[in-house]
Amino acid sequence: MVTGMQRKRSGKSKQTPVKSIKVEFADDPVTSFGGMVLPERLALRLSLWNELASWLPERRGNYSWLDIIKSAVAGLLTGSQGTVACDEVREEEALRKLLGVDGSPEEATFWRALAWLGQGRQVTRLTRTLCTWALRVLKCAKRQDLLEYGFLPLFGDGSLLEGSARREGTKYIKDKGQGLLWTTWFVGPVLAYQEMAGSGAGEARGLRRGLWHILRDVIDPLRMRDKCLALLDSLHGDGPTCSRLEREGLHYIVGALKLAETQRLLADRCEEEWQERGARANCGWIESAVCTCWLQCKDWTAPRLLVGRRSRSEGDLPGVYHYWGVLTDLRETHVGHIMKEGLQFADAIWRLYDSKAGKEDYYKDVLQDMAGHHPPCQELPRNRGYYALLSLANALARGVDLIGNASADRGSSQRQDGGERRHARPKRMRLWRLRRRLFTLPGRVAYHARQVTVKLMGVSDQIRKEFEACLLRLSLC
């Protein structure tokens, strides 16, 4: 038992117990999302709302189309989801002042608006708008934050969202089940293209159509086509996809397991062609090796370089291997800077392709942090409109992180005390962390003479410094 004298000597003070709690309400305009000034500042600096307003028509009703879209984008960033995405903005007058919207729609109005946004020319215009937003974000970002191993990665992939027999557009894919097929292209870490497949459409067709959009509206204005490296999985490892990438002048690394010839060719390689690489405990391999060879299919006009890898896990019979292969147009001159680290050519190619696994984490922002895995509507056009707004919100949040949070600490292994971290700091901040650390800061909002003043309250010194640095970078972009 600790006596009062012992407590006094130890320097600890007794906590005053709470005997009663009173609750009072004040009419002062305060919002729980004062940190939303960051995405709003970026949108104003890059004229993102003006880009939308330039083609949106006048809407008959209580809310303009721009107010509906701004309310939905802000609501998705604050954590709302589905057809009630606008409710956070609707319920907080101070947040509406911060965003500069006259009003925010109720659930039924937003549900009806999704049908118009997801059909006809509106879908095409929203696709072009997403490309424009991505381009402006990428232009303001630091070049070193976009490049990986000297390349600008173009990551294209599809995701099977939740579906059912009642949900329009639901597809059945072997080994995956049924759902809505959503295809995307990421330029660097920024979502630049999205498309929800309809009847008779698949992932390959959607990605080829999306490639045309991002090259015309994003890559060529950046003048970085020669720096691009397309990373695609084995579903796209065939002649038509490789030929398309070659015609566009893009470097690529594409999985080759779709071709039956890949397994046969790698299994027929003699032992002298394989370069042993030993065990990899993180993959569960007790033995691995790499090789390079040329793959020629019947309908190809010329052979393509195949970089292979084999492995043997614990419990596998000796001499029985698992084979993987990727097709690439890269040569030693393209990856010489990676080979200077002591790697062979095949190892450099696999290092680049293995980085694709990290890019699949980009989907976590949309599918997990914004609950995008669960489409909110039964009709396909409404879901298309919803995912167009979801993509705009994701691009805006990624812009805040990419431009506002840019610092030398990202990717560094240096600790604050001078020691070495076991794992390097992440180069990007997940949306849930952005929301918790920066967006959900309580603040008082005042509007006067077309200027909004946000006074944040109860913010710690560390978060205050981060917020001020982020706001300054966004104001100067």
Image (tube, rainbow, N blue to C red):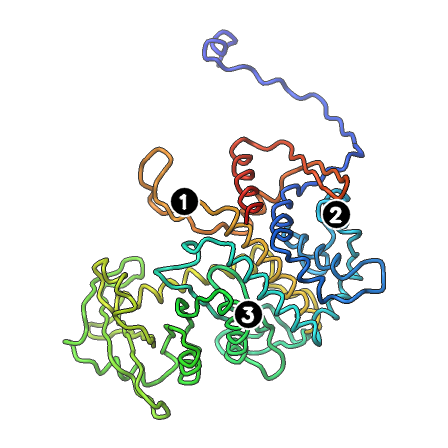
Q: CA distance from mark 1 to mark 3?
A: 30 Å
Q: Which mark is residue 217?
A: 3
Which sits in the foreground, 63 or 321?
63
Q: Secondary structure at mark 1?
A: loop
Q: CA distance from mark 3 to mark 2?
A: 32 Å
Q: Is residue 44 left or right of residue 336?
A: right
Give residue 457's position: percent from left, percent from top.
65, 32
Q: Which residue is disc 2 drawn over? A: 96
Q: Which mark is residue 350?
A: none
Q: Which residue is disc 1 drawn over? A: 408
The quarter of the picture where residue 346 lies is bottom left
Q: Secondary structure at mark 3?
A: helix
Ranked by sequence position, the earlier of labels 3 and 2 is 2
Which sits in the foreground, 14 or 444?
444
Q: Is residue 338 left or right of residue 190?
A: left
Figure check: 379 above or below 130: below
| Disc 3 versus disc 2: nearer the observer | 3
Residue lying furthest top in this view?
5
Q: Amino acid at mark 1?
A: Ala
Residue lying furthest bottom in this view?
298
Give residue 304's position: percent from left, percent from top.
31, 82
Q: Amino acid at mark 2?
A: Arg
- How packed mark 3 is, by other alpha carbons closer than 10 Å (few <14, some 14-19, many 20 or more), is some
